[in-house]
């Protein structure tokens, strides 16, 4: 399925979340439950508030699809891209599943998500160019921080998760996520 065909398919099925695997397999996921949606809204709000003050990049929510170098199309729960990289894309590329990997992203585990698949997805993000990725698991109250140059760091019920390069001055208070 081409990027254009996938974009039309997603538009026709906008009540579901759709991603494409490297091998072309289409993944259809149900909409998030209310608690997950509330948590994701808190994450997006905090990240966007910081990005508006910081002015070095742009924030994208879970409805945004990215066409990655490996041929997959993925939608993280929250993403941030440095301004210079985003602005280098043509308007046409910005209006579709942009051929760019976020510099930073967050995946929020919902009750229906398989943990092993999410951990594989974190590796996939890094292999496609992400500099930093957080996997937040509210039920286990764990945040795993993934970087391409290091093993994942596991944090148990942190009060705040502090960013590092490229979002070194961003911090995410976790009270609304754990609550």
Image (cartoon, rainbow, N blue to C red):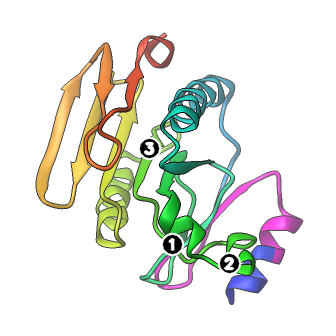
Q: Which mark is residue 106?
A: 3
For the point 59% across and 68% down, which residue is it?
87
For the point 46% across and 67% down, which residue is it?
101
User: Could you say whether the residue bearing mark 1 is in a helix, strand or loop?
Assistant: loop
**Percent position of residue 121, x then y:** 38, 59
**Percent position of residue 90, x then y:** 67, 80
Reading the chain from its start, which is encountered first: label 3 or label 1? 1
**Residue 91 falls within the magenta-colored stretch:** no
Asked if disc 2 and disc 3 are in contact, CB closer than 8 Å, the reply is no
Q: Is residue 131 above or below residue 172?
A: below
* Residue extent of the magenta highlight: 8-28
Q: Nearer the viewer, residue 78 or 57?
A: 57
Q: Residue tagged by mark 2?
A: 93
**Percent position of residue 41, x then y:** 63, 29
Alpha carbons under labels 3 and 1: distance apart: 16 Å
Q: Is residue 112 above or below residue 10?
A: above
For the point 82% across and 51% down, which residue is it?
15
Mark 1 Cα-neighbour bin, 10 Å: few <14, some 14–19, many ≥20: many
User: Could you say whether the residue bearing mark 2 is in a helix, strand or loop?
Assistant: helix
Q: Which mark is residue 62?
A: none
């Amino acid at each position: 399925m081409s990027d254009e065909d996938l974009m039309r398919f997603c538009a026709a099925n906008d009540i579901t979340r759709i991603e494409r695997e490297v091998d072309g397999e289409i993944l259809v996921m149900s909409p998030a439950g209310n608690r997950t949606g509330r948590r994701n809204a808190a994450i997006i709000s905090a990240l966007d508030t910081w990005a508006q003050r910081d002015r070095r990049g742009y924030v994208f929510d879970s409805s945004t699809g990215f066409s990655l170098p490996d041929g997959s199309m993925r939608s993280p729960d929250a993403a941030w891209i440095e301004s210079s990289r985003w602005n280098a894309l043509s308007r046409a590329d910005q209006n579709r599943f942009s051929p760019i990997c976020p510099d930073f992203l967050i995946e929020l585990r919902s009750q229906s998500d398989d943990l092993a698949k999410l951990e594989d997805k974190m590796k996939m993000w890094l292999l496609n160019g992400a500099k930093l990725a957080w996997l937040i698991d509210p039920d286990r109250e764990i945040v795993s921080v993934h970087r391409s140059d290091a093993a994942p760091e596991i944090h148990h019920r942190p009060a705040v998760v502090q960013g590092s390069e490229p979002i070194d001055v961003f911090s995410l208070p976790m009270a609304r996520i754990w609550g």
